[in-house]
Amino acid sequence: MVSIKMIDKTNMRKRNYVLLLLLCCMGTTAMACTNLIVGKNASVDGSTMITYSADAYGMFGELYHYPAAVYPKGTMMDIREWDTGKYLGQIKQAPKTYNVIGNMNEFQVSIAETTFGGRPELVDSTGILDYGSLIYIALQRSTTAKKAIEVMTDLVKEYGYCSSGESFTIADPNEVWVLEMLGKGPGVRGAVWAAVRIPDDCISAHANQSRIRQFAQYGKENCLFSSDVISFAREKNYFSGLNKDFSFADAYAPLDFGALRYCEARVWSFFRMFNPEMDAYLSYVKGTSSEPMPLYIRPVNKLSVEDLSHAMRDHYEGSALDFTNDISAGPFASPYRPSPLSTKVGDKTFFNERPISTQQTAFTFVAQMRDFLPNYVGGVLWFGLDDANMTVYTPVYCCTDKVPTCYDGRVADALTFSWESSFWVFNWVSNMVYPYYSKMIGDVRKVQSRLETTYHTSQKGVESIALEKFKVDPVDAKRYLTSYSINAAQTAVDAWKHLGEFLVVKHCDMVVRRDRDGVFLRNEENRPVKLSRPGYPEAYLKTIVKETGDRYIVPTKDKK
């Protein structure tokens, strides 16, 4: 029997030095990851689209690659937990696997996830497959979203599932499904699960909370589930009503404060961007209403890749949950807060809002899948490293068979800085911006917008060239798209290095050096023109006065 490793990702996982699963499952102490979903008739160009942010403190971000391969009969595959690198066991290798770049394969099948935890007693530590392994194995073996669901559910039935409750977004150019899965407890092989197809004209989302409820509302043709999903809940005393009233989320992941305010609130924020009627569910995410949000809604307007990129940068700005204008935002209206999410002061516990965009993101993407184009050019993974708010989404075509050096986990890791690594260059800039957010974010937006606009406006021309090349030599067409993907990634990181240098000079020592279109202004003596010293914003000065009283008042002489 031949034994192989899973494309030598073990060392990459070990280098991350992070227990992402632990972070995802610690209830209100850490809630990670967000998926946004768009059906093909809800998008401006007929694309299906999904997003992902891999959010975990300490995680290193990189672009994964699993090349297509053929294996001899009897080959076994080593499984190591995606988060920790821990060896879990072996499974049978497929005779043939497909090329996977990031979280998209050569057939445009894309998979993302968020962890909801659910019933802790249902975690089976003896299972061989964890949620991360399931994702990348399914991508290597599936030509459609529905096939990926089959692969994943068959694998856990045969080998066991060792993660906690998980929501997967599984998409292809025609369909998007949400699959929710939990184990059955220690030593019990298999999993309970349910999957719902999102209607083509709708948008959906999940963010670390189970969202599938009564099956009948989704329609029989759009809902799949394990044969014992209801009977097992009865056996465990999670449910006792009529079958028609069974709700997967209520049985396996009951709501608490964290599930509402940290998780469902992110879904609410996305929904309200594209359908104002969703403002009505503010009371639900605040915990004062028991009527849950629907799994999916119809947007007022169709969405683009740019719309989803913008949504991934959300901090509740302009909503009732906007937290950029209170004392905790500091003098420069920061939408970031130190962890943990909740803190005890005296005998009371206080919390921070948890928006879609967060500083602990390792990597993020917007996956675009198009059924009206050949697979090799139809699937684009718009990929970025670090916080979605301050990254640049660059195009990576699904036929790409080489990882850009700047996205490669071999040039750096979680404890090794490198100027060749996009992860560290983007973190260098974002950590410069965090404490001076309102002063610096405008310069970040200029560069970010310029780069992303260039990639999007170039897309049609790039793809036209690839289609022409394919007629002559398919290999050359794919080589061209791979090269373009690599160059786009490198262009972004080079621009970000320059941006970081610019920000250091412009804001050195808390003054502001003046510039015009990114070029610093000099006087006739070749020195900087007069510097500005903006100090604190007026509103924050009033807060200081309120907090310090007379301490800092400049004394005046008595009048005689």
Image: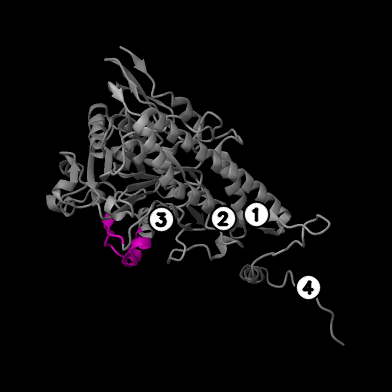
Three-letter amino acid code at disc 1?
Answer: Gly
424 in relation to 272, above or below: above
Q: Which residues are magenta?
A: 271-299
Cβ atoms under marks 1 and 2 closer than 8 Å = yes
Quadrant in which the C terminus appears: bottom right
Q: Which residue is mark 3?
A: 307
Picture disc at residue 554: 4
- SS at mark 2? helix
Please provide percent x and percent y for residue 449: 52, 53
- Circle 2 packing at 10 Å, graded few (<14), some (14-19), many (20+), is few
Q: Which residue is mark 2?
A: 446
Q: What residue do we see at 33% from left, 28% from top?
A: 98
Return the disc, 2 or 3, that comes first in the chain's sequence.
3
Return the disc, 1 or 3, that comes first in the chain's sequence.
3
Return the disc, 3 or 4, that comes first in the chain's sequence.
3
Three-letter amino acid code at disc 3?
Answer: Asp
